[in-house]
Every structure is written in structure tokens, then in C-alpha cells.
Image (cartoon, helix red, strand yellow):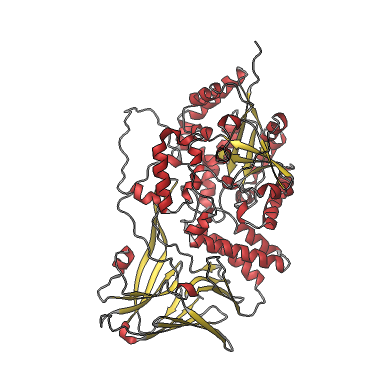
Amino acid sequence: MTRPPPVRFAFGLHLHQPVGNFDWVFEEHLARVYRPLLHEIIGGGLAPASLHVSGPLLDWLERRHGGFLDELGRWVGDGRVELLLAGYDEPILTALSPEDRLEQIGRMRDALRTRFGVEARGLWLTERVWEPHLAADLHEAGVRYALVDDWHFLVAGFEPADLRRPWRTEEGGRVLDLFPIDEHLRYLIPFRPPAEFAAYVRGLRPLPPLLVLADDGEKFGGWPGTFDWVYRDGWLREFLGVLDELRAGEELRLVTLGTAREEVPPRGPAYLPSASYREMEGWALPLGPARRLAALQTELGERVRGPEGALLRGTHWRSFLTRYTEANRMHKKMLALSRLCRERGDPPRARRAIGRAQCNDAYWHGVFGGLYLPHLRAAIWSELARAEAELRREDPAGWQEQDFDCDGSAEILFHSSLASIVVSPARGAAIEELTDLTRHVNYCDTLTRRREPYHESAAGLRPGPDPSGESAPAAPDSIHNRPREMGELPPIDREPRAVFQERVWPAGITPEAISAGTADPIRSWAAAPAAFSHRAEAEAHVFRFELDGLVKTLRFLPDGRIELTLAWDVDPAWPGDAWFTTELSLAEPLVVDAPQAAEWRYPIETLARSEAGMDRTRQGESLTLVWPAAARAARVTLAFPS
């Protein structure tokens, strides 16, 4: 009887650190993840392998540890590592214009050619965010094959048995081969005993031509508990032994994705819907639908990871831009500056800053995603400010009215060579962006406190004892399965945060009650629409906003100073000792002059899940300026720190 050919096993890794991450995080991951991956995993027997290293990580390694890249280059030259493309700065490609997609991939292609002497043709698709039109742009960029999840195929109606080979898709006649990543392998490796991997391979009958695993390299030492489990407690030693056994028995053969594409002809055509990986599609849902999806998945039980479960799905990555106004503003600012940059001849420093501002992490939130991390958002805003400062270096002060963030209401965009400001008349004429183009800081870069689906499921949760009673090392949970510990539900905000949001409060109100979200204002203009008029003065642009019972005048000076005057009607129904307030939600302190105003302050804190569990994070400070409501008028001046 003829022995069937061995299963080809394409093992791929994605190594990534975002723009703006702390230097110590890079150093720690080099020691605990990237060096062990190169020496003990790939060098220990998991070669040949396919590898993607993100541009921000390449830049850091080039500056700090060029020897690591030299060593990687030798392995590439020996054929032990195949390097993969992506957008250089690790953007979500579908979130960019076609021109920017091509530029990002081209930058990575040039970097790999210059540093390693290779012409890469395969692509790691960031967060596996796929939209059908990508096929044409990727082909145009010289990409011939890319990685997506088997989930992408399952939601299109493919059967699991059909996903052990590449499939060909096209857009407008431009073709691209797609490799389905095996989700089961993502949860087996390295979280289950290696014998289960061998059983999985041997249980595939008839033997398929190809198995593909491509996942974050950080799960091999960077995720909680994985360093001890993989290296010290014997998982890697056992796994390499299992691989040797499978290879010796001619049951399995390691290949790169490029080799797999040469040896396993693709089928086709396959037309995939917009998709990301399974977990991402759930994270992108708003609260109510997320609850309903979780209930349906629980009802489906074990079948949730089969073809039936693929018919229950969340939403697409772009829904994060609907859920989080902060992400949407960053994204729309990036798109606007990219267009402006091209209109002005693409000055290199501005273009490079815009590229870095396209790094995906700060634009979304789940177990991964960095929207809740202030230093990652600040890094994006800093790069946007650097680009805008370059592009507006000689610009006089000016303004436009347009629906900047695509929310259906027009904003006022004021800019000079020193400041960039966005005001929303539809939201009480609040300031939504206040960027100092000299210090590269957006003072509005705080985060609204929202109810997240995991808040409810984690409230009061405490991990129980290990029911096995075993003292042997236990496999760490995948990050997706780790329990989340939390006490009471955290407070949430009534309206998205901004600068200059006016309310009236009863006299007994305290900052603590406002911070806790348990107090109701007597009157709020924070979500009220305003009509406005504009006049130009010799050194300022003045906007007068008329709301029901409130007139609000903002005077913008070219150096970024803002003069606010407020005049309000006193409702006879208000208590005589009521307070009139304007709240400023600030990422960093500003110079504030508010004559005769009292001040209420509290930290803006969020409770959000991460790889390690629940994190309490300071997002900025709320400063509320307070006057007696009977005063009927007030004024405030803001200035950037000198």
C-alpha cells in the first residue's frame, strides 16, 4: 500500500510593537520573545518558517540591536526564514486610501529588499482585516499571496475540509492567493500539551496537503504565563520532540508559505466577505448586540467553533470607528492630513509622520488593541501634529465648516501654523480637538468612560481553586479565555467628553458624585445643537453660538489661545443657589484663567481588559469651572503651556 505524502505544515509568526510603545516593552520582548523565537524555536527545529516583523519593531531593532537583524538576515539567506510583507507601520489596510495602502506595502518591500536582499511576495494581513476590494490593491502592490483566517472562509459557506490548501480570489481580474489559518491550531499552540497537536495531525483523514498556523509571536513568551510554560516547563522541548517524531514517520513536513504555494495548486475562485478573526468581530459590536451574540453562542455550545458557529458572527473592524468617537476622530484626521499632504507635494517628513500615525493599535479595543492606552493614542496624535505642523508651516489662520468626522453634522475646523482646533456645534459647541502644533499634543485626547460588555460578565468574578489539585505546571489560558476579575461596575459618562461642556447643577453637588456618574444635572447643553455665526477680527476668528438659553462665544487667536465668554438665562425653576459650570476634559494641563470661578477636579479613569486582566488607567483629568447660576455670565481664557 502506498504511503500518503506527509502533511505540509506552514508555520508563520507575526512580531509587532506599536508606534509609541514604551522602550522597556521593546527590550523585554526582545529578551523574552524575539531572541528565544529565533534561537530556540526556529533554531530548535521549527524551520523553515515564515516571519513578519513590523516596521516600528524593525526601526527599533535597527537603532538598538542591529546584530539581531544581522543574525535574522543570515537565516533568511540560508532559506530557514521567509520574510512577509505588510503595511510598514502596521496599519489596517482597509482603513487607508488606496494610495496609502500601496505606499505602506511598498515601504515594507523596500525595507526588506535593502536590509535582507529579498523580494517578498507574501503578506501578513494586519489583524486579518479583509475586504473584497483588497485583492486588487494587494496585487497592484506586488503581493501574490496573503494570510487570512479559516473563519473568513467559513462565514462565506466553505466547509472545513476544503480549507487545507490555498484559494484564489480576484478583483477586476487581478488575482491573489489566500492561505486559511487553522483556528484550532491557534488554540493548540502553545496552550495545549504537544501530544494533542500530534493527535490532531494524525486524526486528519485523508491527510490534507497543507496545514497553516500563523499567529502572534508574542504568545511564545510575551503573553501572561507563556514564558515559563513554553521554555522552563518543557512545552517547547516536548513540541520539538513531537515534530521530530512526525517528520521521522514522514507524516509531516515543514514548509514556508512560498513553498506551499508552489507545491499545492490553489483552488478557486473564492469570494470572501468583509471579515476579521472571530474574536475581533465580537469586540467591534456595541453593548446590546454583543450581549445577544454571547447568548446565542452559549446556546450553540461546543458547535460554536464549527461551521454552525460561523453563521453567528459579530461585525466588521470599521465598526470600532462607530463605537468610539475618539478612534473615529484620529482616523478622519489621518485621512484628511494624508490628502492635504498629497496636495502639497508629499513633503517627506510629513508623509513619514502620517505613515506612523496609521499604526492600527490605538484605533480599536478588545483583549488586544490600544485605544484604552493613553500613551499609544498620544503617539498617534503626536505624529498627526508633526505632519500638520510641517504642512501648515506658512499658513495664515483660517477655518472651514465641514462634516469632518462623518457623523452627519458639520464641525468647525480652525487652524493656524501653531494650533489645530475642531468645534462641534451639534454638541453644544464643545471643542473636540485642541492640538498644539509646537508641542505635538492634543489636549482633548481623553477617553469617554463607556459600558463595555465584559464589565457586566466580570463584575464580582473571582477565580476559583484549581479543581484538578495537581501541582504540575498548568498550561496558561489563551488570552481570549482568561478570567477577568472586577468588583462593582465602573462609572460611565452621559456624553462623549470634550472641552467646554456647560451644565447647571444643584448646590449640594460634589465632584465625587459627578465622577461616580450618579448625579443628574438640572440642565445640560452638552448634547444640544447650536446655530453659529462668524466674524473675522484683525488678530482673531470669533464664533458666536446660540443655544436655547445660552450664548457661547469662542475667540480663536493664531497662537492657540482661546477666549470663551458665556451668557445664560436663569430659569425661574432653578434653585436660587444652583451652580453654572463648564467642564474641560483634558489629557494634559492647560493654562486656564477663569475669574471668580471655583474649580472641581477629578481623574478620568477607565477599567478595561487587557492581556493581563483588568487594568485601571488614568485617561486625563476633568476640570469643571463653577460660578453661581445667578451670575448669568462668565469668561475663560485657555492657553498652551509655554
Residue drawn at x 50%, y 75% is: 640
Q: Is residue 103 left or right of residue 196?
A: right
**Residue 79 visible in rendering:** no
Query: Residue 299 falls in which quadrant of the image?
Result: top left
For the question of whether residue 476 can be seen, the reply is: yes
User: Foreground: 569 or 392?
Assistant: 569
Left/right placement of residue 601 relative to residue 384 reads: left
Residue at 63 percent of width and 39 percent of height: 51
Q: Nearer the viewer, residue 44 or 478?
A: 478
At 48% from the left edge and 29% from the top edge, which residue is drawn? 235
When the figure is inspected, residue 387 is found, relative to residue 536, above or below; the finding is above
> Image check: 622 left or right of 105?
left
Q: Quadrant of residue 255?
A: top right
Q: Compared with residue 574, is residue 3 higher up or lower down, i.e. above or below? A: above
Locate the N terminus by quadrant.
Answer: top right
Q: Position of residue 608 (x, y in %)?
A: 41, 53
**Residue 567 on image: x %, y %:** 40, 85
Q: Position of residue 184 (x, y in %)?
A: 51, 33
Considering every residue shown, the one lying at the far top of the view is: 1
Q: Position of residue 206 (x, y in %)?
A: 59, 21
Position of residue 153 relative to residue 447, above or below, is above
